[in-house]
Amino acid sequence: MMFQFSKRLLTQVDKRQLWKMAYIFGWKGTQAIWQFKRRLKKGVYFPPFLHISITNSCNLHCQGCWVDVAGPTKRIEADDLNRIINEAKKYGNRFFGILGGEPFMHPRLLQVLAQHRDCYFQVFTNGHLITDEIAKELRRIGNTTPLISIEGSSKVSDERRGRGNVLAKTLEGLDHCVRHRLFTGVATSVCRSNIDDLVTEAWLGELSEYGVHYVWYYIYRPIGPKPSPELALSPEQIQRVREFIVKVRRKAPLLVIDAYWDDKGQAICPMATGISHHIGPYGDIEPCPIIQFARESIYDYKSLYEALTQSEFIKDFRKTAAKHTRGCILLERPDIVRDLVNKHGARDTSGRMRGLQELEAMQPCHSQFHPDAGIPEEQWMYRIAKKNWFFGFGAYN
């Protein structure tokens, strides 16, 4: 597996892209984790990785999406986005996840990426707006990996994403990325309507043939204005996804990523460990992208560091989530999320102003936490990486 994957990287990805990925994401990202660990010893939580939703605008309307794409357009302006990144860099951060809506609807995204050549960005996108010119510019900038969402066959994609001809347009954007030799990923929210099609070796083989270099699987979360809870996975299906990920890592010619299990196969929540938090398109500082409540904003404090390290709301969320589950507190216990929001007087940051009603209407469902059914990593590279750089950080002690 590693020989095939290494050969593909060396022959398919721009060499400057590879160097920046290895140095900034690999080496600098490792240093960010070390700094995070040192801060933890002092009881200070400032995440080494930040996810930033830069706009709520999107050209699709997906099932289970938490973003209010039908509402008035809101985005973090470039000056504020640069300020966030610069402040985070002071504390070792060099990796940022850029989300939306659809990030490529932000008019100055490329300029921001180009302004921070010492950082590495993962842009979560549906791929529809990645033209040949944009892919060419991403290659020139050299510090960005597009993570393109594919949700199933043509029929399933149209159903899941609220428009027609979705898959063909996504594959067109994917093709532009591959032709311009970008390090390119595909993300899939695994649900009942796509698990049989996409959680298969045949699908990974197809992606490899397309020129995709990594795949990120995560489980479907029935939230937002169009939650579609009938698509949520059963416990058995979630275990099936985990078992597939572990087994296929030994032979797939691409990386298979997850962010929800440690090296021993124990569930983790990145928010509960403190390794990552989220800034929404209104500038609100949220526990994670899918929990749209906040007390603090990037506009309320002198610095991002001060806002994150002094937030009692974020602190209580981390501790309470870790106390009740190693999985997703929102999926399993929306009642606890509601109580935390009321306790701290947190405001609704969804733009819909129906966050509490949506919490009240949510039916608890299963997340990645199965206390008696952990499946440890088998592939040595993933096992070492997770053991040293992506684990519970003491959150569950």
Image (cartoon, rainbow, N blue to C red):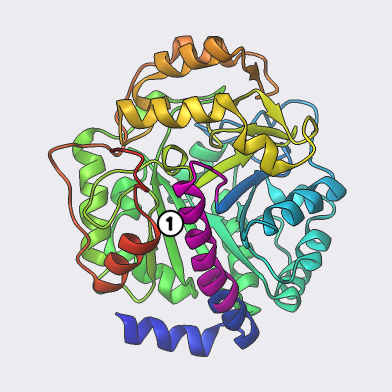
Q: Is residue 395 magenta?
A: no
Where does the N terminus fall, quadrant-wise?
bottom left
Image-based side of 170 in relation to 252, left or right: right
Image-based side of 292 in relation to 43, left or right: right
Residue 389 location, x and y as percent?
Answer: 40, 61
Residue 122 visible, this orientation = no
Residue 246 location, x and y as percent?
Answer: 24, 60
Q: Tell me what residue is drawn at x 35 percent, y 63 percent.
A: 388
Q: Residues within 10 Å of mark 1 (few under 14, many from 20)?
A: some
Residue closest to the far front: 42
Q: Tell me what residue is drawn at x 58 percent, y 16 percent.
A: 355
* Frontmost residue, 386 versus 311: 311
Residue 387 visible, this orientation = yes
**Vertical relation: 263 (above or below) 26:** above
> Where is mark 1, residue-wise?
216
Q: Which residues are magenta?
A: 23-47
Quadrant of residue 170 within the rendered picture: bottom right
SS at circle 1: strand
Where does the C terminus fall, quadrant-wise?
top left
Residue closest to the far left: 372
Image-based side of 98 in relation to 36, left or right: right
Quadrant of residue 349 within the rendered picture: top right
Amino acid marked by disc 1: Trp
**Vertical relation: 150 (above or below) 180:** above
* Frontmost residue, 187 versus 175: 187
